[in-house]
Image: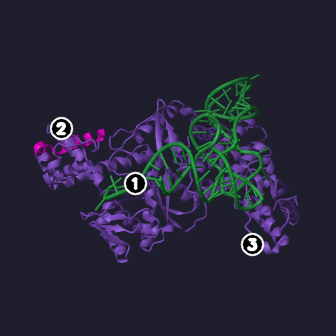
Amino acid sequence: MVSSSAPAGIASASFDVRQHLAGLLRTALVSVAPEQGHAEIILERPKQASHGDFASNLAMQLARELKTNPRQVAERLVRELPASFAVAKVDVAGAGFINFTLTPAARTAVVRAVLAAGHNFGRGPAKRLRLQVEFVSANPTGPLHVGHGRGAAYGASLASLLAFAGFEVTREYYVNDAGRQMDILAVSTWLRYLELFDEPMPFPANAYQGGYVREMAEQVKQAHGDRYVHPAEAVIACLPPDQGSGEDTEARLDGLILAGKDLLGEDWAYMHDHVLTEQLADCRADLEQFGVHFDVWFSERSLFETGMVARAVAALEKSGHIYLQDGAKWFSSTAFGDEKDRVVQRDNGLYTYFASDIAYHLNKFERGFDKVIDVWGADHHGYIPRVKGALSASGADAERLDVALVQFVSLFRNGQKVAMSTRSGDYVTLRQLCAEVGNDACRFFYMLRKCDQALDFDLDLAKSQSNDNPVYYVQYAHARICSVLAQWDGDEAALARADLAPLLHEREHALCARLAEFPELIQLAARDYGPHALAFYLKDLAGDFHGWYNAERLLVDAQATREARLALALATRQVLQNGLSLLGVSQPVSM
RNA sequence: GCGCUCGUAGCUCAAUGGAUAGAGUACUGGCCUCCGAAGCCAGGGGUUGUGGGUUCGAUCCCCGCCGAGCGCGCCA
């Protein structure tokens, strides 16, 4: 079973132990049960070290077909297993697991692989599949809040992860620049502007309340003086008779928008575009500051201007999926599993948000993405059936669309849940959060939960105990390694050729196993759209390093041992860098 | 009421259908003459909400119930 000398293959950076072991099992399988020769061979990394480096449940899978006790099947398989230079020991354990223990050389070979690949260690083979990740896509009607921050952190990390896993990734932000919300922001700004000229209108409770609206009004005043001023009486006169002094209803808000359009005429477009440009720039700056970048900023309005929306609806109409009722056009989404049919064009002729979203998704598909991933707030979950239904009705393959739902973030301050409302402007912004806890902690903290888990964010805890934040634990491991290497002051490049035989301790082998796991983890996390797995991995990796560091000295006198350990430390630093950079977290040399 | 997402240690959260369900935090006790103590080591802590089912094997898949959040508009 055990070969005395390791062939050159094991030293190669491309040697894949898992694949090698699967090959051995395949050979045994064909010998033991030829009729089952094509059964899937699964090799997992056991949680417990005593179960070896790899375990296979193959015997348990076969037991039923072979009508034999799993342990007996396992023992027969082991007898037929070819000898291998990489395998030190094979055990049958538990219900019928086949456990492989690797030779020290096979375990430590990963160090060489990491140092050879550098920042590409863990990168998956190019898959020639084009993916689009659309995320954040918040209405540009005010500063991003902590909920957007979670979507931003998740989407950005997911996109980086997918790209690293081997996909071609486009990061996109859908700008809702065509809807009623933008009109509300414009009229909100205009009303604040009128206040500056002592033309006070009662400011509606359902208009945008945030201070940034007053700031924009002030800017407009500075730049254009009283150009947009109209007497309050004139504005009120424009309102529908029953809305003159009434309550803050949606109808009154719409009335105010119409009044703005009537009184300002062509200047309304200026007001509308000004607030859009301001808020979008603000949003973009926040995201850049947060380390989140987009390849495409896609305008909803462009879908109307190019006739995309009208064409999409017309196509559905032509294929018989649209009907008229109460003066509106309805899409028969119930035929595709939705709860009820949905309006795509209102009785006043305006298209709904849903209509432009159909057009948008068809446009995404037309751009040739193999997979389109939408990152949505969890409150939009009811929206999935209608979008997928519309795609199916349009002849597109709805399976090409995946939706990742990001659950809500609740902020806690002084043990109290912070009430947040976008419309009232009473919310903690992403900018404030980053200022409090820092970008790195913020990005990492968001990644410490699966996206479909609601997140309770305790501001006091994050602030007062920021030193205990796991991100520092990981970064500290990186800084420590940098510090040791600096003291050593040798040729790091030469460590790639170090003899790894002196790496004998259990902790060193555990650390090697963790490093070897990284490429596998990348693929799994990418498959599951779960960048959080990367954060947990980095915590574990840092933990393995800290444990080893405390148990063994790196800068020992014996040259061979010193260089082997430094090579392992260098490889660890490399994987920490690769992982942290995917999450948008910095890798400080000192802290 | 219907639908979606969830329910795991005191708290915050993990766990491709696998073995004794794991981390952090909090608590208790140890470790700096030594490469960075933002670190390490040890300890107690659990009927995985609940009752069934599928499976050699279920925290994971299916059904019921209980509980939480969200959604159910010719808003986005």
Q: Secondary structure at mark 2?
A: helix
Q: Dot 3 corresponds to which residue?
A: A38
Residue name at image x 14 percent, y 37 percent? A198
Q: How is the image coloured?
A: by chain
Badge 1 local density, few (<14 within 10 Å), some, or many (20+)?
Answer: some
Disc tally is: 3
User: In which quadrant of the rendered image does the C terminus of chain A lie?
Assistant: top right
Q: Earlier in the sequence, mark 1 or mark 3?
A: 3
Q: Amino acid at mark 1?
A: Ser
Q: Dot 1 corresponds to which residue?
A: A137
Check the image and report above or below for A238 versus A436: below
Q: Amino acid at mark 3?
A: His
Residues in magenta, as a range: A209-233
Specify whether residue A160 is painted magenta: no
Residue A573 image label: none
The percent coordinates of residue A77 (x first, y second) are 85, 65
